Amino acid sequence: MKKSVEGKLSLTSLADQLRERIADGRWAPGTQLRQDAIAKEFGTSHIPVREAFVQLQASGFVTIVPNRGAFVSAMTTFEASELTEMRVALELLALDAAIDAFGPEDEAAAREILREDEMAPDVESWSIDNWAFHRAIYQASGRRHLMETLEAIWRKTDRYLRLVWQLERYQDVSFSEHVEILEAVLARDRRTAKRLTKAHIQSAGDVMQMALRASRAG
C-alpha cells in the first residue's frame, strides 16, 4: 500500500484505490461507503477518507447524501449517452489537431500499446490500454487543456466501459477498430480517421447501453 514520506496514505492514492474498486464492480452502485471501515483498512484517519469521497463525488463515482453518508453513484443510460456525446465531440477535435503533427515517436508509442493490448488478459488491462491508445494519438495535438478535459471524461467513462469489456467478444472488435484508426492517421486521411473514431466511440456507447440494460435485468 503506497505511503507518503510522512508514513500516511496519500489522498491521491486513497482516492485512486477507492475509484478502482468502484470501476471494477467490487462496490456496486448504491453501496454505502463506511468511513470507519475504510479508515481502518487503510490505516488512516477519517479526514483523508472524507476528502477522498469529495474527490470521487467530483468525478462522478460517489454521491454524498447529507446526514446519511457516501454512496457509490448510480450508473444511468442518460449519463452513458452524455459521456458518449462528449467523447465524440472532444476526441474528434483532438484528433483533428493531432493528425498532421503525428510523428514516428507517436506511431511507435501507439503500436507498442497495440502489442500490449493484443496480449492483455483481463478487463482492467483492456481499460488501461484503451485510453492509452487514444491518448497516444491525441497527445500529438499539443492541446494541454483539451487533454486534461478528456482525461476527466475518461475517468468517468471507465466504469461504463468496463461493463462493455465484460462482453469479451467486444475486445476483439475494439482492437480491430484501433488498428484501422491508426492506419488512417498514418495515411493522414483525416476524413477516414474521424469517421472511424466517431463510429468506434458510438459503437462502444451502444454496447454500454445494452450492458446497462442487461445488468438491470440480471
Image (cartoon, helix red, strand yellow):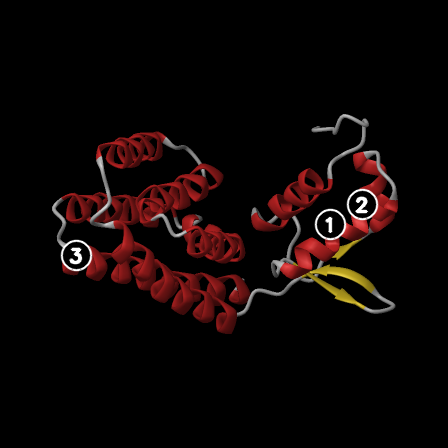
Query: In percent of the image, x 33 and y 56: which residue is there?
Result: 94
Image coords of residue 58 (percent x, y): 65, 60
Residue 137: horizontal and vertical position, in percent? Answer: 30, 45
The residue that disc 3 covers is 190
Amino acid type, mark 3:
Arg
Q: Amino acid at mark 2?
A: Pro
Q: Amino acid at mark 1?
A: Ala
Q: Residue furthest bottom?
A: 78
Q: Determine the secondary structure under disc 3.
A: helix
Q: Which residue is mark 2?
A: 48
- Distance (Cα) linking label 2 and label 1: 6 Å
Please give the name of the residue rendered at 36% of the width and 48% of the height, measured from the top-left corner: 142
Element marked by disc 2: helix
Mark 2 and mark 1 in contact? Answer it, CB < 8 Å: yes
Q: Which residue is mark 1?
A: 52
Q: Identify which residue, 79 or 55, lies in the foreground.
A: 55
Label 1 environment density (alpha carbons within 10 Å; few <14, some 14–19, many ≥20): many
Give the percent coordinates (x, y) of residue 177.
24, 49
Seen in the image, is 19 located left or right of residue 117? right
Spatial CA span between label 2 and label 3: 46 Å
